[in-house]
Amino acid sequence: MFPDSLDTGANIEIGYIPGPMAWLVGENLRKYYVKILNTGITGQVHRDRLLLTGDSPLASNNLGKLAAETLLEAVNA
């Protein structure tokens, strides 16, 4: 999951998203006491059982590697 900071500010100004988001995913998840681990924009990835997340577009390569490892584990189990 991308941090809320990617859905505000400069990304709107440069056209990455077309305008202000009606709601922010992270903000809403926190209301349900979900602990968000990927808070930066560093390329960090995280695995919780079969849920794989990355913190930003910088995480795409690492997320692909983590997905491949996770799939291989499932096939070889």
Image (cartoon, helix red, strand yellow):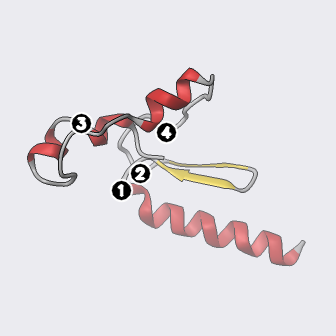
- The Cα atoms of the two marked residues, 3 and 4, are separated by 16 Å
Front of the two marks 3 and 4: 3
Residue identified by numbered label 3: 8
Q: Residue at x 60, y 63 (%)?
A: 66
| Residue farthest along the left direction in this orientation | 13
Residue identified by numbered label 2: 43
- The answer to whether mark 2 and mark 1 are in CB contact below 8 A is yes
Residue identified by numbered label 4: 38
Type of amino acid at the residue the image marks with label 1: Leu
Q: Nearer the viewer, residue 27 or 63?
A: 27
- The Cα atoms of the two marked residues, 2 and 4, are separated by 9 Å
Residue 19 x %, y % = 18, 45
Label 2 or label 4, whichever comes before in sequence order: 4
Q: Residue at x 54, y 31 (%)?
A: 29
Q: Residues within 10 Å of mark 1 (few under 14, many from 20)?
A: some
Residue identified by numbered label 1: 58
Instruction: Check the image and report above or below for 50 versus 11.
Output: below
Query: In the rendered view, does 42 fall on the left or right side of 19?
Result: right
Label 1 or label 3, whichever comes before in sequence order: 3
Quadrant of res 61:
bottom left
Q: Secondary structure at mark 2?
A: loop
